[in-house]
Image: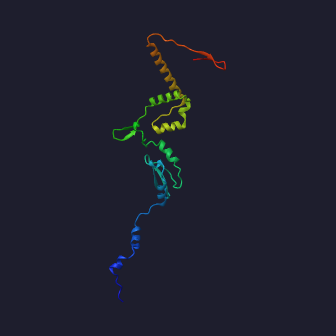
Amino acid sequence: MESEKQSPADCGNMPKNRTAASEGSSLPQSNPEESKAKRQRHSHVWENFTVITKVSSEGVSELRAKCNHCSKDYAYESHKKDTSNFNRHSLVCSKKTRDGDVGAMLVNLEGKIQARKIDQVVFREMVAKCIIEHDLPFSYVEYDKVRLIWKYLNADVKFISRNTAAGDIFKFYENKKTKLKTELLEIPGRIAFTSDLWSAITVEGLSV
């Protein structure tokens, strides 16, 4: 029997499904869980974290969220949108450069941007002035959220206790009193002080 011959036109009309399937089989297959997680990541925290696939010693693979600065990783579940753990880590990560505050950045000898070294004396003086001006309790320096803000602004900050804050305020008062005495001694002439005495409705004597 003679074999049927196919014309060039017939060859051109042959379906290409088989060729496309064979070529497509060599392409890498994406992880559907990882693709789904990537579509759902809209929080700004993902500027500092990357989702990775980590294999345990038992050979089990799982998705983890790794810090882009210190490489510490946390458990990550694509169906959950809770990023509070990642946010907390970003606030205290010692390797993370604090972006946005150009005034708090310096360029070191290697040309790399780094956080400005904090002056602990200036910091404690500013805290003392803040407590005085806003009439805050000495325990203000021990508030957890206040310390978290300080740590976020500069990881090298050294926390102080309420007793240290009280001592700094007393020193600040003594320095101001000494400075005022010096200024009064240098004033030519005399100074007159007046006072107004009156009684409150509770019969307590007050002076102004």
Which quarter of the rendered picture does the C terminus lie within? top right
Q: Residue at (39%, 39%) from the top-left corner?
A: 114
List the single residue furthest toward the right.
202
> Which colour assignment does the render follow?
rainbow
Visible residue check, residue 56 = no
Q: Is residue 109 left or right of residue 54?
A: left
The residue nearer to you, when weighing 26 against 198, is 198
Observer-nearest residue: 21 or 64?
21
The spot of residue 139 in percent (x, y) is 56, 31
Query: Compared to 182, does 55 lie above or below?
Result: below
Question: What is the x, y in percent for residue 93?
Answer: 46, 43
Q: With respect to residue 39, does 116 lie above or below?
A: above
Q: In this rendered view, identify the residue nearer to me: 189 or 118.
A: 189
The quadrant of the rendering that contains the N terminus is: bottom left
Residue in the foreground of this view, choosing between 141 and 189: 189
Where 34 falls versus 141 (above or below)? Answer: below
Residue 101 at x, y = what percent? Answer: 42, 39
Identify the residue at horizontal 41%, vertical 72% (top origin).
Answer: 17
